[in-house]
């Protein structure tokens, strides 16, 4: 289980900076609850149950689920959104594996960085209010997930509007030793 998660987000409206959220979440032990300290927009603390995943943990769990042939994966995610006070229940549907070399429509950066040589899966994740809210997701994300954690073909659907993302560049960072 991940121990630390720092978050910072900024929202803009008409090119003007609106809300800024900053904070840090810490899990003392693998199954321990998560303590969140919010620095902006207002100082605050939050205690979350130990089963909550941070975004990178969730991505790794999705890859593990896909590799083991699961078609559905559910988890609670904390990503620091909504002024650092929101936990989402998520349901991910994982499509059938796309074999390496089977995708002829890769963008240049994806080809150059070898994504076509990796297995991938179409994934759709619904993000729901954590406290038993509506059965309709607050938003949904669809994308292609590669075995190395890179994603492309992104579509975020908020109901009233959607955002489509295209991979325009890809840089692999060198791994550093964790402390």
Image: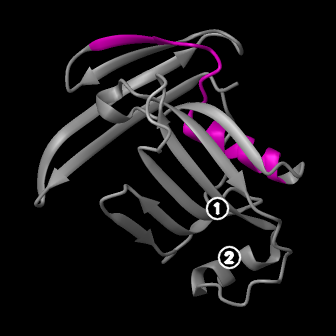
Residue annotated with mark 1: 150
Q: Residue at x 59, y 85 (%)?
A: 107
Residue 156 sits above or below residue 99 on the image: above
Q: Which residue is mark 2?
A: 113
Please identify the quarter of the rendering in which residue 61 is found.
top right
Which structural element holds mark 2? loop
Q: Nearer the viewer, residue 128 or 109?
A: 128
* Quadrant of image for the N terminus: top right
Residue 35 falls left or right of residue 178:
left
Q: Nearer the viewer, mark 1 or mark 2?
A: 1
On the image, the x and y values in percent for residue 31 come to 70, 12
Q: State the residue at coordinates (58%, 69%).
A: 152
- Residue 38, how many percent across, how many down? 32, 20
User: In the image, which residues are magenta?
Assistant: 44-66
Q: Can you name the residue that lies furthest to the right here?
A: 68
Q: Secondary structure at mark 1?
A: loop
CA distance separating discs 1 and 2: 11 Å
Q: Nearer the viewer, residue 74 or 52?
A: 74
For residue 177: magenta?
A: no
Q: In the displayed orientation, state which residue is furthest to the front.
A: 135
Judge the density around disc 1: few (<14), some (14-19), many (≥20) Cα neighbours within 10 Å: some
Task: State the residue at coordinates (24%, 15%).
Answer: 43
Q: Are marks 1 and 2 in contact (CB under 8 Å)?
A: yes
Q: Residues within 10 Å of mark 2 (few under 14, many from 20)?
A: few
Residue 149 drawn at (x, y percent): 68, 56
For the point 82% across and 65% down, the residue is: 96
Q: Quadrant of residue 94?
A: bottom right
**Along the polypeptide, which appears first: circle 1 or circle 2?**
2
């Amino acid at each position: 289980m991940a121990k630390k998660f720092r978050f910072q987000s900024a929202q803009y409206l008409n090119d003007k900076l609106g809300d800024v959220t900053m904070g840090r979440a810490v899990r003392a032990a693998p199954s321990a609850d998560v303590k969140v300290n919010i620095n902006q927009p207002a100082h605050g603390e939050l205690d979350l149950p130990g089963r909550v995943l941070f975004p990178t943990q969730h991505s790794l769990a999705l890859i593990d689920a896909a590799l083991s042939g699961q078609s559905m994966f559910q988890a609670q995610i904390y990503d620091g959104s909504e002024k650092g006070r929101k936990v989402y229940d998520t349901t991910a549907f994982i499509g059938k594996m796309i074999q390496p070399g089977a995708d002829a429509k890769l963008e240049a950066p994806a080809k150059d960085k070898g994504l076509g040589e990796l297995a991938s899966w179409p994934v759709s994740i619904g993000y729901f209010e954590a406290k038993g809210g509506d059965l309709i997701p607050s938003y949904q994300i669809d994308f292609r997930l590669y075995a190395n954690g890179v994603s492309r073909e992104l579509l975020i659907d908020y109901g009233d509007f959607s955002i489509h993302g295209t991979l325009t560049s890809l840089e692999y960072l060198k791994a550093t030793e964790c402390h």
